[in-house]
Image (cartoon, rainbow, N blue to C red):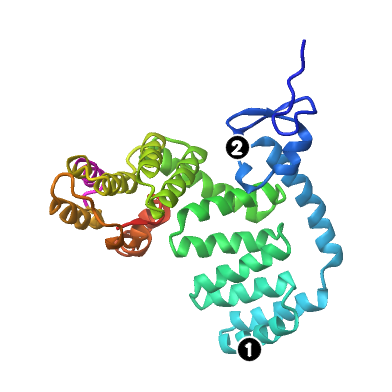
Amino acid sequence: MKKTRCILCNATKAKRSCKERHDALICPKCCASIRTQMCEGCNYYEYAERYHAARCHTAGEDTSDKGIEREVDNALLLQEKGDIDAAKTKMDELLRMHPENHVVQYGMGVVYAFKGMCDEAIRHFDKAIEIFPYFVQAHYNKAVALLKISDMVNYLRTLKRIVIIGEEDSEFVKAARHMLLESEEYIMKHHGVGLNKYLEGERKFQEAFSYMDNAQWEDALCCFKECTEMVAGHAQSWGNIGLCYAHLGKKELALSAIDMALEIDPLYEVAYMNRKAIDRLEEGEILKHEKLKTLNYYKDVAVQNKPLLETLMGEERIKRTS
């Protein structure tokens, strides 16, 4: 039987199906060389990440500076006792002296998180993770901060990352598994899809939004329609389908799509505003691109008046055009 060659190198036998290349067959060597976080959900990615994590956890323990760690612990202890200003001053000093130490960056993130400055906290947690990618505690605290700002997609992705790289009996892994299970149950109940499919739909939404941002209305329209096929009841996609049609001069189709968004979510205020703007157009008249703004509606507007459970497990809070 003739062997199937890898579509990338065309030299080695293809043994693995690559999801990022529409299930085309590639060889193990090419699989390893092109692997990124976009490969999440693939067994080969997860096996490799667990292997590297196990090695790095050991290496991190062997090479970490215990003296600096103790100083960070002391600073955070001040914070726990209520002396937040002293803790911040101490962490500022440590950060100035050791900016490339992942524990220091993590400690700074904790200080900002305690002060309710979640964006700053996430920035420092990300820096800690950049320095030491398998720092599970930083990933976990980043997830908590993402939840507080209602960035649900990145919250879910961060939890999945913890499960992949964390040690099985870790409390952080156990907590992340529990939070993912609760999230998936909600997503399945309200959207009829699993967690991976839900996140795949979000990736497609971002692709659609990038087309829309560049005024590529036909391409954006196709992608948004795919989103509605992946995730049922996705009001944001229907709202943006309406805007795409409006930019193509198809008023009736635009209004129909906006009405679908409002049928899914009658409280989707931005759709009401867009409908008024579109309704003033003549059939064939094109909505001007410069009139649009970017708004992360469910994160920046609606979530402020929603119950905690809905905030925790609500629809995708991803940006769209309004």
Q: Locate residue 231 relative to residue 200 in the image: left or right.
A: left
Q: Residue at x 60, y 45 (%)?
A: 38
User: Who's the residue at 60% across and 34% down the image?
Assistant: 21
Q: Quadrant of residue 172?
A: bottom right
Q: Main secondary structure of the magenta part?
A: helix
Specify the quadrant of the image occupied by residue 11.
top right
46 and 168: which one is in front? 46
Which numbered dot is residue 89?
1
Quadrant, the N terminus? top right
Please provide percent x and percent y for residue 12. 80, 28
Query: Is residue 112 visible in the rendered structure shown here?
Result: yes
For this orientation, the residue located farthest to the right is: 62
Q: Is residue 286 above or below residue 59?
A: above
- Residue most extreme to the top: 1
Q: Residues within 10 Å of mark 1 (few under 14, many from 20)?
A: few
- Residue 66 lies in the magenta stretch: no
The residue stretch that appears in magenta:
256-266
Q: Quadrant of the C terminus?
A: bottom left
- Residue denoted by label 2: 20
Judge from the rendering whether residue 257 lies leftward or rightward of residue 223; answer left or right: left
Q: CA gap, disc 1 to disc 2?
A: 46 Å
